[in-house]
Amino acid sequence: MAEQVMRVEDLTLIDGHTNHVLVHHFNLTLHRGEVIAIIGESGSGKSMTCKALLGLNDRNIQMSGEIWFQGKALHDASEADFRKIRGRRIAMIMQQGATAFNPSFTVGAQLTMMLKQHRPMSSQQQKATLQHYFDMLGLRDFERILKSYPHQLSGGMLQRLMIILALALQPDIIIADEPTTALDAITQYEVIEELREVKEKIGCAMLFVSHDLAVVKSIADQVIVMRNGDVVESGSAHQLFIQPQHAYTQFLIAARDRVTRYYKSLRGDASC
């Protein structure tokens, strides 16, 4: 079996102002090269759970349970400890590529600055590293893109640049939080294909957060289904999509199938 990179035991998150339980007894074991998807509707606790793994939730969020990353207890980690891990050991790809970049600097300056902070190397090595991952994702116009400001690039390109930065930092885990939500259907497909390629070529572990079951089915090895802060079902992606056990999972899959049939009917697909 592949090396275990993260284990989460009984993670519970509570709003310190209201004492409302936001996430209840969340458990996870993640191995190198594995993709675990966390799915559920908005407000189910997906993103908050992932932020807890990196110590990014608001101060009023109280946490109990254990988070282990390669033998280190993150549930007891200080902010200084987390700063050593974020980006370099655990990278995060956010929902909105545009918000990840400072509009006042070129994307090239920002990518090289992040590399310098987490992986000290010469300017030539930085450029060669970025070029390598551009080539891996099949992206062209390397020089033009690096000289561009965020507003001069599409949302899809900015999303790809976040993926490139995550890869260049060579983390043990990539957390992708709804990475395709703001993209059109074609760009969404292309980004997912690129993430699949990352999974196959790099072999790092990945937590993939989404409400899009079609996307999850195409990339995940394991799936965790959340509703109102509770894990209602978990298991292999293959088994879960064929034989969902919980009524909520069945509802999500049935809803996806209805939408798929509807769009096929609009195209006049005789198989629907």
Image (spheres, rainbow, N blue to C red):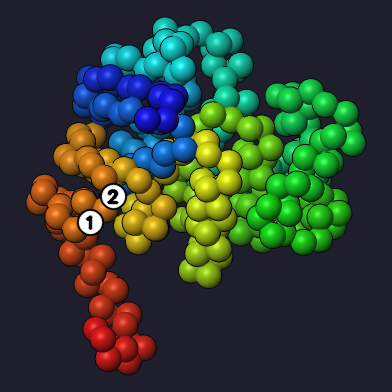
Q: Is residue 130 above or below residue 241?
A: above
Q: Which residue is mark 1?
A: 241
Position of residue 143 in the picture relative to residue 176 (left or right) = right
Mark 2, secondary structure of its residue: helix
Please identify the residue farthest to the front as the structure is shown: 1
Residue 46 in view of the camera: yes
Task: Look at 52% across and 59% down and name the residue there.
Answer: 193
Q: Residues within 10 Å of mark 2 (few under 14, many from 20)?
A: many
Number of the label disc, if any, that sits on residue 71: none
* Position above or below: 86 against 231: above
**The N terminus: image quadrant:** top left
Q: Identify the amino acid type marked 1.
A: Phe
* Residue nearest the observer in this picture, 97 or 172: 172
Which residue is under mark 2?
Answer: 237
Q: Nearer the viewer, residue 96 or 219?
A: 219
Q: Nearer the viewer, residue 21 or 46?
A: 46
The secondary element bearing badge 1 is classed as helix
Q: Quadrant of the C terminus?
A: bottom left
